[in-house]
Image (cartoon, grey):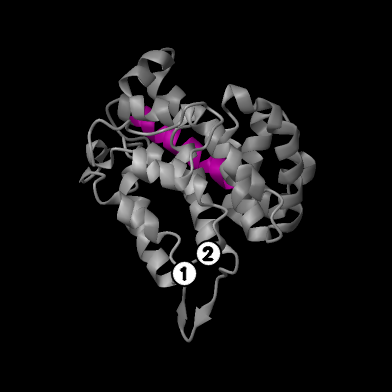
Amino acid sequence: MSHSRRRTECPHPTDLPSADTLLETTDWASLGTPCGTGESLPAALVRLTDPDPAVRESALRGALWAVTHQNSIYEATVPVALYVAAILDHPAFATDRSRHDGETSRPGPTLVRLLDWLGDTAYDADDECVALGGGDHVEEFLDECPEMREFRDARPALFSAVRTHLGHDRADVRHAALVAAIPLIEHPLLLVHRADLADHARRLLATSTDRRRRDRVFDGLRAWGHDISSLENASDIAAREHYARLRAARASWGAGLQGGGYSAEPPF
C-alpha cells in the first residue's frame, strides 16, 4: 500500500466510513501493533465476515487481540475498531449462534464477540483510565498517548454502529451492545444518550445473570447519578461487598509497601 494514503479515514466524529473504504484508504503497514506493523491486518479483517465460523474464529485472534495487547491502545487499534463497527450489520452474523458440536463448545457468536471487543477496548481508553494516567494533567497525558486520544475522538462513530444493536431481537446481542455503549457515551457529543441507555440498563438487570455485564451496567448507572439500591439482588450485593474487601486489602497492602514493609502477607 502507498504511504501517501491517510492512516485512517474518518472525516467527521460521527461519520463511520464503510469497511471497504477503511481497508483501501488506511496505510496499514505504517501502523504500529504490539508485534510490529499492521501490514497483515487487512487479510485478517476480511476473514471476520467469512461464511465459515471457524474462519471467523481464527480471524478474531489475528485481527483483534493483536491490536489490544495488555489493555493498551496502539496505532492500529483505531482503524481496526472502526472496521469492526462498520461490519456489525454484516449478513454473515445473522444466523450465528453459540452451539455445541459433540463435546466441543464453540465460543460465542461473532457479533457478540465483536461488540465485547469494542466495549473492552473502549474501557481501556475511558475517562477513568485517562484520569489514572494523567491525574490533573489529562491533556498532557493524551498528547503523550495520541493513540488513546484518537480512539476517544472516534467514539461517536463507533457508537453510531453499536447503538443500532441495542434493540436487537437477541438478548445476548442487546446486552453486549449496551456494555459496549456505556464507555463510548462518555464523549461529550454522546452524553444525551444517557437516559436511553439507563432504560436499557434496567432491562438488562431484570433479565441477565451475567456477573460481568451486571457489574458494568451498575458502574454506568452510578456514574450517571442513579440510585441503584432497588436494582440490586442478593448476588449483586455480595459481589459489591467482595469488591470492597479486595479494594481495602489492596489499599492496606499499598500502605504497608510505602512504610517499608507489608501490612499483610503479599498474595504471591
Question: Is 38 displayed left or right of 126 in the figure?
Answer: left
The residue sitting at the left extreme is: 36
Residue depicted at x 56% and y 47%: 242
Q: Position of residue 126 (x, y in %)?
A: 49, 31
Residue depicted at x 45% and y 70%: 53
Q: Main secondary structure of the magenta part?
A: helix
Where residue 92 is drawn, which disc sits there?
2
Q: Residues within 10 Å of mark 2 (few under 14, many from 20)?
A: some
Callout count = 2
Residue 209 visible? The answer is no
Q: Element under label 2?
A: helix
Q: Find residue 48 and report its image quarter.
A: bottom left
Circles 2 and 1: CB atoms closer than 8 Å: yes
Three-letter code for the amino acid on which mark 2 is drawn = Ala
| Viewer-proximal residue among 262 and 111 | 111
Residue placed under numbered mark 1 in the picture: 51
Q: Is residue 195 above or below residue 169?
A: above
Question: Is 226 displayed left or right of 186 in the figure?
Answer: right
Q: CA distance from mark 2 to mark 1?
A: 6 Å
Q: Residues within 10 Å of mark 1 (few under 14, many from 20)?
A: few
Q: Is residue 202 above or below residue 171?
A: above
Residue depicted at x 60% and y 54%: 211
